[in-house]
Image (cartoon, grey):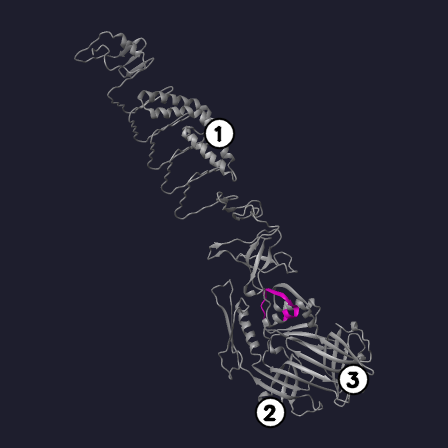
Amino acid sequence: MANSTGLQFTVTLGALPAGTFAVVDFRLDEGLNRPFSLSLSLASAQPDIDFGAVLDQPCELLVWYEGELQRRVSGIVSGFTQGDTGFRRTRYQAEVRPALWRLGLRSNARIFQAQKPEEIIATLLDEAGITDYAFALRHEHAQREYCVQYRESDLAFINRLASEEGLYYFHEYEEGKHRLVFADDAGALGKGPDLFFNLATQGLSEGAYVRRFHYAERVSTAEVELKDYSFKTPAYGLSHQKTGSELEHQRESYQHYDYPGRFKQDPSGKAFSGYRLDALRAGAVTGEGESNCAGLMPGKAFSLTEHPNAALNIAWQIVGVTHVGQQPQALEEESGGEPTTLSNSFSVVKGKTTWRALMPHKPMVDGPQIATVVGPTGEEIYCDVYGRVKLQFPWDRYGASDDQSSCWVRVSQGWAGGQYGLIAIPRIGHEVIVSFLEGDPDQPIVTGRTFHATNPVPYPLPEHKTKMVLRSNTHQGSGFNELSFEDGSGRENIHLHAQKDMSVKILHDMTKRVDSSVVESIGENQNTEIGKHHQHRVGGNMNLTVGGQGLGLLGGLFSLIANSGKFMKKESAKVGEPGVEQFADDINKVGAAAETMSLTAGKSFTDAGGFKSKAGLDMVSKGTSLAGLLSSLMPGSGIFNTVVEKFRSDTTGIASTEQVGLYKNTLVGHTQTLSVGQVLKLLVGDKYDIESKSAIFSRTKKHTLYAKEKMVIGGPGGTITIDDSGVTIQAKSIKLKAPSIDMSGGAAEQAAALSSDKPFSEECPYKKK
């Protein structure tokens, strides 16, 4: 179908025979970083082409000149239209796009972790069945810790990711296929033809040429500064600047500043600022023109020659080009006799300039989202050194709800300072609320936590709506620690529960004031260490029981206590002290009262666990009542040791009783003084033994010694024995010295007095009154 111009266009679609369609005209629009678009106007002798044999099938357009192939374009048929039918031919329209275009039909939301940008792009291409691609990269691109494709097509995601990383792409064509090439530097461009400049309109007989070329310069951004923030280096300013070249014809003060710069490390920040500057200055120095060269395509540079302005006779790289071809002969008798032609218009930048695309809009997260805390199998709490956790988002179809489902995500805490604040790590299975810094899906942060059907609240609601609760859960076990506040009117309470141990450290003072009662139960041991002084004041009574068998031993001492009470009451009556007499009377009541009240209180104390505070209050009441009956006199069965390094003073306002069940030893290292204001009574059940290493001296106004059966006064020289038989004196010698000695017999009343336990009368009964 060649004509006088030597040009010819042919096309094949799918598996249809090569001559099925004739090309009437076409328009090919190509550019860096975008899929090409080829519109074909076709004619066919078949009026009933099967659309299934064409749609989504390969298509290849060939451009010939004098029988030699000048250009090929291959892709897939994205649209097919049947038009009018003429004398012998039916018109068709075909839209052809590269295989990459298919990714625009796939929309997704997914997470990529610990991958370089080229690895992420390769994953998407492989999943779409595109295997013929290549990366011609000069620069090292850092691994991305966390990269989210969020509610965008695969193609839009690739374009966005490529532009952020300074990548661009173009197509190369071979027989029956096209290759997608990603590059990050002008050095990856292939060399195209040399085109001379020619204003005249002529054919290709002398070769392809440029018929129009316009050169332009535009005032553009001169400098870029990008800044970001990393919590790992909070005091360090992640800021990087890059200044452009070829600024001779404009001011250098046009700075582009942006935050966040979408980087967390210096190497990425330095590279990103350069990529951003290249994109912003891509239109600073440009050219545009027209030619008849079918070989012009993105990804190749051509050299311009013979331009009147010698400065323009340099290498230029194609940024975008639109080819228009017309072949009226395809319509045969309907052609009108017009020749076959091909022309194009193009835009270029200098061959040494690395062209980069401006970043497209990044999808933003409109508001907070719900996620679930996840981690490895068998773990309950999974976090890193910063308290970050892993999450599973409901929209993520690829996550397995494990420790690989997301990056480490920071958790907002109620208070966070330098080694102080509030820390509560969300646990695996917890539902959390996630916000996104700057709305960026790549920067999630946990800002809240929520209960749900399988993670209910600690106390049933609304029954416990007046409770404020802080409750933990034992890690890999059963139990909990809890601090709760009950704000119900009349039921106000602060409850503290420790599953095992509790530690309190106060560096200075602690003040505790209880206006009513305190119940304290210690299951085993208590150890109190006081560095200096201890002062204990009891306004009423104080009961102290040492040992767990006090009540058992108490039964054996009831008679002893009762006898002691009778004795005190009898003696107090003699001296006429009603207060002491009442005190002694109370001792008589202790036996029955101690048994009844102590057993009741002990049971209440045992049952006062959990929340049974009422039983504890009853116990305090009963214990206080028992103290009113002097239950403090009752002994216990344990051991009570008191060691005072220097001085000790005990003061009792009214009365004091000390009861010792078996033995009592009092050891005084130097001197002991006993001072009794009025009466001193000493009762010994069996023997009374006094031993002094040196001397015994007793002084009083009146002194009576009496023995019911026998009294012996002895010394080295003899003894005096007084018994029922009389007085017997045995001595080595007896010496009596006195002014007078009366040896007369005694009266009957004096003999009777000897058998009485009353003191001797100091006055003679026969003394005349």
Under mark 3, the amino acid is: Ala
Under mark 2, the amino acid is: Pro
**Label 3's element?**
helix
**Label 2's element?**
loop
Q: How crowded is the residue under tag 2: few (<14 C-alpha within 10 Å), some, or many (20+)?
A: few
Residues in magenta, as a range: 140-158
* Residue at mark 3: 330
Query: Which picture quadrant has residue 51?
Result: bottom right
The tag on residue 599 is 1
Rendering coords of residue 190 (x, y %): 65, 80
Camera-nearest residue between 745 and 676: 676
Note whether residue 82 is visible: yes
**Taking 249 as reference, is 70 left or right?**
right
Query: Which label's residue is closer to the chain start, 2 or 1?
Result: 2
Note whether residue 383 is visible: no
Under mark 1, the amino acid is: Leu
Residue at x-position 33% and y-position 24%:
578
Camera-nearest residue between 205 and 492: 492
The tag on residue 162 is none
**Label 1's element?**
helix
The mark total stands at 3
Q: How crowded is the residue under tag 1: few (<14 C-alpha within 10 Å), some, or many (20+)?
A: few
Rendering coords of residue 273 (x, y %): 54, 73
Query: Which label's residue is closer to the chain start, 3 or 1?
Result: 3
Give the quadrant of the N terminus: bottom right
Query: Which picture quadrant has residue 276?
Result: bottom right
Query: Which label's residue is closer to the chain start, 3 or 2?
Result: 2
